[in-house]
Amino acid sequence: MTAPLSGGNAPARAVDAYTAAQSAQDAAVGHQTRSFRVWRGADGNGAFHDYTTETNDGMVVLDAVHKIQAEQANDLAVRWNCKAGKCGSCSAEINGKPKLMCMTRLEELPADEPVTVEPMRAFPHVRDLVTDVSWNFRVKPRIKRFTPRKPDAPDGTWRIAQEDVDRVQEFRKCIECFLCQDVCHVIRDHHKHEEFIGPRFLVYAAALEMHPLDVEDRTTALKEDFGIGYCNITKCCTKVCPEHITITDNAIIPLKERVVDQHYDPLRALVRLVRGKKKS
């Protein structure tokens, strides 16, 4: 005889079992509800809007912003590209600190308070989390380009010591996220955009000045046009760099030393004075 089928409450038990399994799975992957305060507005005007969304272990702030955008705020403007910490597009201020949204894990932030996400403050606001960083691209062409010395080998190439190559290699890691520009008080608080090129381009100038083949002199421009004297080496730019470039110690301070040697060294000043009198 065939055994009777189970009673009519079998579907209910199946649903309960599925719900329990789903709850266990959610707990295993760390599902939780988090609160976010996202800046909304345009052209410098706006306010924080509060959102609540479900998050998982391993999610970064950009994941949460995309989830809010998909489910609650379809018109939320946010700039991003690679989502791998290499394009520098998703720069923002998270809990008041300049960071890449794609490299800031939610588990690193306090779970008992809202995560605030707002645009960078050092540049003109466009909309929501997007700022106009085009000023940076106007600064770069002002710096004298790489000018190599004549080849010193018979085959038309150069001979370079490895230690000299290694010295500038660090500066090439810059992804131009402009977080260092954003945190710099000279630009952020004092708005010296026309007088100071900022830490990103001091790094760029250092990469050229310290290059073993370059023969161009940029010290006068650093002093008179690029405002290197404004930097008081607080090292805030170094702290926010996602590529861990030692901006202050390895780039800015050596450039300052070159400017001092060139323009403030008393012996050199005396030599220039004597030469000037001879010419006259």
Image (tube, rainbow, N blue to C red):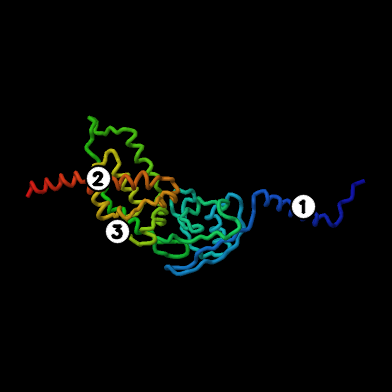
Percent x, y of residue 236: 42, 52
Provide the residue designation for mark 3.
195
Mark 3 or 1: in front is 3
User: Mark 3 Cα within 10 Å, few/some/many (few <14, many 20+)?
Assistant: some
Mark 3 or 2: in front is 2
Q: Secondary structure at mark 3?
A: loop
Determine contact: label 2, label 1, CB under 8 Å. no
Mark 3 or 1, nearer chain start: 1
Provide the residue designation for mark 1.
17
Left/right placement of residue 272 relative to residue 42 reads left
Provide the residue designation for mark 2.
261
As measured in the structure, the alpha-carbon distance from the residue carrying label 3 to the one carrying label 1 is 67 Å
Determine contact: label 3, label 2, CB under 8 Å. no
Q: Residue at x 92, y 46 (%)?
A: 1
Depicted 75 relative to depicted 81: above or below: below
Mark 2 or 1, nearer chain start: 1
As measured in the structure, the alpha-carbon distance from the residue carrying label 3 to the one carrying label 2 is 22 Å
Q: Which corner quadrant of the image does residue 65 belong to? A: bottom right
Q: Residue at x 60, y 62 (%)?
A: 52
Depicted 159 relative to depicted 232: above or below: above
> Along the line of sight, which residue is nearer the eye, 169 or 225?
225
Determine contact: label 3, label 1, CB under 8 Å. no
Left/right placement of residue 180 relative to residue 9 reads left
At label 3, the amino acid type is Glu
Specify the farthest residue to the top: 154
Left/right placement of residue 24 relative to residue 211 reads right
Depicted 248 relative to depicted 73: above or below: above
Percent x, y of residue 118: 48, 61
Q: Residue at x 41, y 56 (%)?
A: 183
At label 1, the amino acid type is Ala
Q: Secondary structure at mark 2?
A: helix
Percent x, y of residue 274: 12, 46
